[in-house]
Every structure is written in structure tokens, then in C-alpha cells.
Amino acid sequence: MSVINSACDLRLAHGPCILCGHQLQYPFLEWHRDSEEGQHISICGKCCQKIRKGFTADLIQVAASMDIRQLNNGPHYLLTRTSMDKLIDGYITAYREAEGNEAANKLMAKIKNNRWGPPAVESNDNE
């Protein structure tokens, strides 16, 4: 798979975006199938923006399902995606039942502080 950023990049594909049908403009994604037939898939930059989360997640899910199927050498097991927020909510609910509201609220605050940025620095109130 290659990202074609400019005319200076090697470009073997000819034709429109496989998803929207528009003519390719830089940047775009190009995937070459390993075959003598020279088949390829090209996806324009705008379509890449639209599908980036779902497409990547779907590829990962299918690959993981195939890996599990090969490991088990048996029936297919269904893997489902769950959002990080839903996983955290379930974890906090279980923690709240085991440790109480105050401990669960502290843990939730700590998770929110660390989720999207650098780790929060804990202060010592005794100093």
C-alpha cells in the first residue's frame, strides 16, 4: 500500500477512486495486489477521510477473526467492537459495586485526566 503525495511519487494506477468514482487528486491511497495481472485499488484523499475509522477498524476485526479461527481450528467466533467509553463505563460500574462511589469517582477522574493527553501529575497536598 502506498500514499501518493505528488507527481514525483511512482504512480502505476490509472483511473478513478474505487469508492466515489472521481478522478484521483493528490494525495491518494494506492494498493497493488501481488499478481501478474497488475490489479490495484485507488482511494482518493476525501474518501480516505470519510472511511478512516470504520475501514481500519473493520480490517483489524476481520484479521483478528481469521487469526482466532486459525488458532481454534474450529467454529467461527464472533468478535464485536466496543467503544472505549462503553468499556470504561462497564469497568467503573463494576468497580463502584466492589469499592463504593467515592473510590469509583476518583478512578473515573483519573481515567479522564489520562485519556487524551500526557499523564496527570499527582500533587501532594501535605507540602
Image: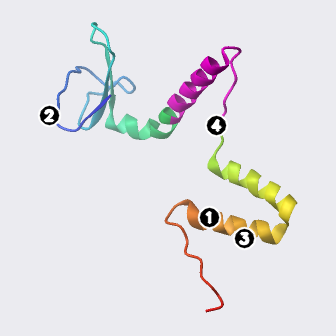
Magenta range is 57-81
Circles 3 and 1 in contact, beta carbons < 8 Å? no
The residue indicated by pointer 1 is 112
Report if residue 79 lies within the magenta region. Answer: yes
Residue 5 rendering spot, x and y as whole percentages: 22, 38
Which quadrant holds the C terminus?
Answer: bottom right
Q: Earlier in the sequence, mark 4 or mark 3?
A: 4
Q: Is residue 124 left or right of residue 11?
A: right
Q: Residues within 10 Å of mark 1 (few under 14, many from 20)?
A: few
Q: CA distance from mark 3 to mark 1?
A: 10 Å
The residue indicated by pointer 2 is 7
Up-down relation of residue 99 to residue 126 (above or below):
above
The residue indicated by pointer 4 is 81
Q: Main secondary structure of the magenta part?
A: helix
Q: Quadrant of residue 62?
A: top right
Residue 101 numbered mark, or none: none
What amino acid is found at the position of numbered circle 4 in the picture?
A: Arg
Q: CA distance from mark 2 to mark 1?
A: 44 Å
Q: Is residue 7 left or right of residue 49?
A: left
Of 110 and 4, which appears nearest the observer? 110
What amino acid is found at the position of numbered circle 2 in the picture?
A: Ala
Q: Please report the residue visible at 23 percent of the width from the left and 21 percent of the height from the top.
A: 13
Q: Residues within 10 Å of mark 4 (few under 14, many from 20)?
A: few
Q: CA distance from mark 4 to mark 3?
A: 27 Å
The residue indicated by pointer 3 is 106
Q: Please report the residue visible at 12 percent of the width from the left and 35 percent of the height from the top.
A: 8
